[in-house]
Structures are given as C-alpha cells and as structure tokens.
C-alpha cells in the first residue's frame, strides 16, 4: 500500500526514477523501513490496510547502519552517492531540540485519499503530544501536503533541496498553549 501511496511522490520518483520498476523497488524499500520502525510500536493502520501512519519515538529517528546497508543494497546503482547525500542533507535539518514523535510516514492508498484516512491515523499521536505538552516533527515531500499538515498545527521550518532532486519541507508542531 505504501508503495502505491508514494508512487507519484517527487522524492520517491527521485529515488526510483524508472516508472516501470518504481513500484516493485518501493515495495522492497518500505519492507526494509517498516522492519526497523514497526518495533517502536507507533504504527497505525486502517482495518482494511488502506492507510498507515508510522511514528518514531524520541531520539529513535536515525536510520541505523544495518538499515542503511540494506537500503544501499536495494539502491545499488550510480545514484547511490547522490541519494545518501540527500538523506544527509535532510538529517542535518532534522531538529536537534527534543521532540516527542517524528511522523516518518503517512500514506494512504490512492483510491482512499481525500477521505480522512490520514487525519484519523495521525490523531492518536497528536493527541498524545497535546496531553504531554511536547512537539512533533515531519518532512513533507509534496508541496500540496504542506497545507494538509498545517491544519494540524505543523509549520514549515525551512525548505530543503535534495541534490539534483525535489524540494522537501521540514515541518514542526508545537503543542497547543505553549506560546511558541
């Protein structure tokens, strides 16, 4: 489902430029990513598996060396140095002040998009952030999604241009009532 949800995503097209191979390669990539993120127990999916929100716990957003190695084997091609340079650029912009949760992935199967699936999947962790009084963070890879995330209190902190690739929008969300 995530491979289909992100098929037309500018960052995914940058990682997998061959339209004919993107879906299969993205499926393998998401399998690797989920294997490392799912044990953090902040994965929310719909009953029909039409959407997923994957959050990482505080200070657990870094991609491990083991995961990096698996992703490198999947991406083994001439684009690999550029791809890792892009990931390092994003990581440099990742906030270093404490934040509760990082929304690493929010995806909805295309036939279900625009029906409130993403909103429903984000709610449990956003409510937790509000109760605990802690901020949250995400990176939008689609400019049109910036407005969507803004409705939940996220604001663009900067714009990051990936090497020979698309723009990304890191977004920060302060909990209500913090005056920040």
Image: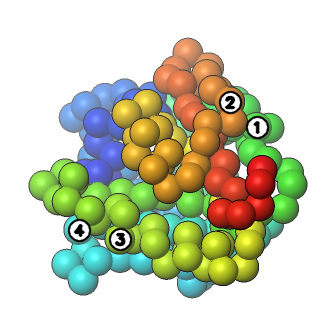
Q: Nearer the viewer, mark 1 or mark 2?
A: 2
Residue 32 in percent (x, y) is at: 50, 63
Can residue 35 be spotted in the picture?
no
Residue occupying the far right of the picture: 97
* Secondary structure category for the residue under label 4: loop
Please provide percent x and percent y for residue 178.
Answer: 77, 61
Q: Which residue is mark 4?
A: 50
Q: CA distance from mark 2 to mark 3?
A: 26 Å
Q: Considering the numbered disc 3 on the image, is that residue within a helix, a strand or a loop?
A: helix
Crowding near the residue tagged with mark 2, few <14, some 14–19, many ≥20 C-alpha atoms within 10 Å: few
Q: Nearer the viewer, mark 2 or mark 4?
A: 2
N-terminal-most mark, 2 or 3: 3
Checking the image for residue 93, the label placed there is: 1
Q: Residue visible at 58% across and 49% down?
A: 154
State if disc 3 and disc 2 touch (CB < 8 Å). Answer: no
Q: Which residue is mark 3?
A: 120
């Amino acid at each position: 489902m995530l491979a289909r949800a992100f098929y037309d995503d500018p960052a995914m097209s940058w990682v997998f430029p061959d339209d004919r191979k993107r879906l299969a390669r993205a499926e393998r990539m998401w399998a690797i990513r989920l294997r490392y993120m799912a044990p953090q127990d902040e994965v929310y999916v719909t009953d029909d598996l039409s959407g997923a929100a994957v959050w990482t716990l505080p200070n657990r957003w870094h991609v491990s060396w083991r995961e990096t190695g698996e992703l490198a084997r999947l991406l083994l091609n001439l684009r690999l140095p550029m791809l890792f340079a892009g990931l390092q650029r994003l990581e440099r912009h990742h906030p270093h002040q404490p934040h509760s949760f990082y929304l690493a992935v929010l995806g909805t199967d295309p036939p279900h998009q625009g029906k409130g699936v993403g909103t429903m999947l984000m709610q449990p962790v956003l409510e937790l952030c509000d109760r605990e009084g802690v901020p949250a963070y995400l990176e939008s890879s689609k400019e049109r999604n910036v407005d969507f995330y803004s409705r939940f209190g996220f604001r663009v902190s900067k714009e990051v241009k990936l090497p020979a690739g698309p723009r990304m929008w890191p977004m920060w969300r302060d909990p209500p009532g913090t005056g920040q």
